[in-house]
Amino acid sequence: MLSVRGIDVFIQASHILRSVSLEVGEREVVCLVGRNGAGKTTTLRTVMGFHRPHAGRVEFKGRPIHGRRPYEIAGLGLGWAPEDGAIFADLTVAENIEISTWTRRTGRPAAGRIELAYRVFPVLRRYAKRKGPQMSGGERKMLSIARALALDPEILLLDEPFEGLSPAIIPAVSDGIREITQLGHAILIAESNIHHVPPWTSRLYVIERGEIVFAGAPADAWRDPRLLRIIGGAPGSV
């Protein structure tokens, strides 16, 4: 479904990504794990068209999408929930969700897409008339993902969906993401904390200093002391 093939990305004079490759298949949950600054967000932003690769290709369903504008990529069926949420602060929760149904026309009615977003994150229904500044960080994360889901995408890209959340709110976000996978959507998650990698993840990539240093089953990553030192899973690591 989604294929990133050997992309190199520069931001100004800095070489951020070095021959990064990864794959996400249909209905698959894939996690890209790495320390802060390793290149996770740049990878997702390149897929979404915010950065143009200097080399390599990004393909969706066999079609090249690198070089397209973000709104064009969203229109093809890629939903994007950035780390900071990027919700529209002047709009209500209901308006933030509804706006995605204008962005991409599909066979699913807008009302059904909106209702699905509320079903996945039911707490948002209570806050439908609230605006961004009136919501907690966890509620804004849920709204960002719900808005991406209302796009009716085939794949969702979630950047640090658990970052900065209190332990009390993480289960609600995790349950919502799991329900999205059960609906048949593929998901690519960028995560800095391996302990937040969902147990139903089918494949894991580890990125370090802009390079993929591991690709395989999550269980194999847990057995590799070198990787655990990189991603902070080893006892006593930071």
Image (spheres, rainbow, N blue to C red):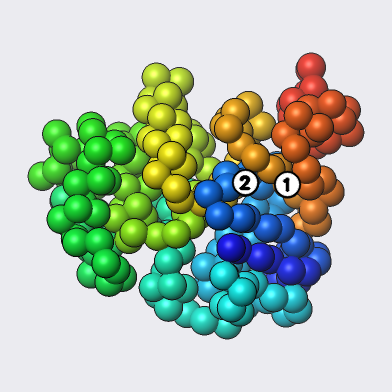
Mark 2: amino acid:
Val
Mark 1: amino acid:
Tyr
Q: Which residue is mark 1?
A: 205
Above or below, comparing residue 170 to residue 52 in the picture: above
Identify which residue is drawn at 10% across, 44% down.
Answer: 129
Identify which residue is drawn at 35% across, 52% down.
Answer: 149
Above or below, comparing residue 185 to residue 64 in the picture: above
Q: Give the distance between the C-alpha atoms of the residues marked 2 and 1, in whole angstroms.
A: 8 Å
Where residue 101 sits, quadrant-wise, is: bottom left
Where residue 220 sits, quadrant-wise, is: top right
**Location of the C terminus (image quadrant):** top right
Point out residue 180 in the picture as x, y percentages from the top left corner: 41, 42
Estimate how packed mark 1 is, as few (under 14), some (14 to 19) or many (20 or more) residues with alpha carbons within 10 Å.
many
Point out residue 191 in the picture as x, y percentages from the top left corner: 60, 41
Point out residue 43 in the picture as x, y percentages from the top left corner: 64, 61
> Is 6 displayed left or right of 80 in the figure?
right
Secondary structure beneath label 1:
strand
Q: Which residue is mark 2?
A: 30
Secondary structure beneath label 2:
strand
> Is 101 displayed left or right of 148 in the figure?
left
Point out residue 169 in the picture as x, y percentages from the top left corner: 38, 25
Q: Residue furthest top?
A: 235
> Is 147 displayed left or right of 179 in the figure?
left
**Residue contact between numbered discs 2 and 1, judged by CB atoms under 8 Å:** yes
Where residue 139 sits, quadrant-wise, is: top left
* Residue 10 visible from this viewpoint: no
Identify which residue is drawn at 19% across, 61% down.
Answer: 109
